[in-house]
Image (tube, grey):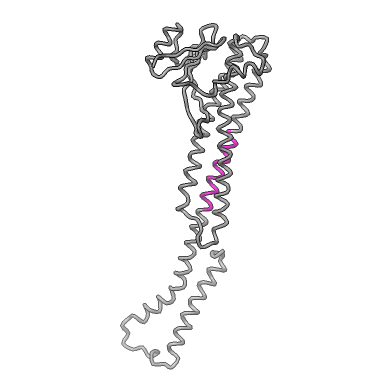
Amino acid sequence: MTAKLITNGAWTRIFVSNANDLEQAERLTGVDLRPHTNQPLFMPAILKVAYWHSGKIELADLIIANDGKNLITVEAGDGLPFLNDLGDRLRRQNLNKQEQTAVFYVAIQAAYDAATQILDEVETHFDDIRLSVRNMQLSLDQVNSHGVSDLPELDDKLTTIAQALSHVAHSFGQLVQCARILRREAKYSSEISRQNMDDLIADGESSLRRVQFVVDRQRFHARQTAQVVATSDLNVIKIFTILWTVFLPGTALVNWYGQNFQTMPELSWYWSTWIQIFGVLILTVIPIMATKMSGQLR
């Protein structure tokens, strides 16, 4: 596959599949397209972007460069889907597609929307998780209650959400940085005012705060799930505690009469059997009542 270039106004879009395609694109444009560290944004830069596609999260590298007149984006394969409607965005906002600043402005907006869609999808999954946790809570006192065996499924969901939020937060962080650099270094046209740039940055910072809120929700549900499972396991331990309490007096009685005494006169008593039975019952009830009064059976 060779590099494919599409120019639309002040935006040159390059599609590559490997390093050789990138070298070919550099020859065609005469611009260095290999990102360098500690370089200004337009010389060029690479962004880690996250977007929702075909029911799952996709991660991609987006190289942004500048040839002095046009904004250049380098995308892998068939390109990033959320950039396909940049022309429509420019028209809806009555922006000039021949203005590089306007193109970069709407490109950041498109990336914002792509990352925001992931947040929306994540929050819909929280409804399922909350319902699952609620069902676990309601079934704690039932015979077929939930326990550790039910934890992996919920844990996998929460782990997936945590990974998604990490990618989204990183993407938003880079996009906000791009917006700030664009405001500082770009020459504003009459179409893009400083207030528009400030609003763009504010939108990104607001999205970062939303990501943090969703992260807190994810951590809350993770703690809640662990607490429910711990409560369920505690109920199991209570059952074994009661069984141990019930059988302990009988075990003591068996151990007592299992010894090799030379003389055991109580075996010849008329009420010996009943005395031993009631004695065991009394010794059983006392530990159970003591355990219940201590609050361990709540």
- Residue closer to the observer: 106 or 264: 106
Quadrant containing the N terminus is top left
Q: Is residue 265 left or right of residue 112?
A: left
Name the spot of residue 223 as percent of width and height, x first: 53, 46
Let me know if residue 72 is in the magenta part: no
Q: Hey, which quadrant is residue 26 in on the image?
A: top left
Name the spot of residue 28 as percent of width and height, x first: 44, 7
- Residue closer to the observer: 276 or 159: 159
Name the spot of residue 113 as percent of width and height, x first: 59, 26
Q: Is residue 153 left or right of residue 92?
A: left
Residue for point 63% across, 28% down: 206
Quadrant containing the C terminus is bottom right
Q: Main secondary structure of the magenta part?
A: helix
Number of numbered discs overlaid on the protein picture: 0
Residue for point 39% across, 11% down: 23
Name the spot of residue 37 as percent of width and height, x first: 45, 16
Query: Which range is magenta?
Result: 211-228
Let me know if residue 216 is in the magenta part: yes
Is 10 situated above or below 236? above
Q: Is residue 259 left or right of residue 123?
A: left
Is 245 situated above or below 104? below
Is 155 situated above or below 28? below
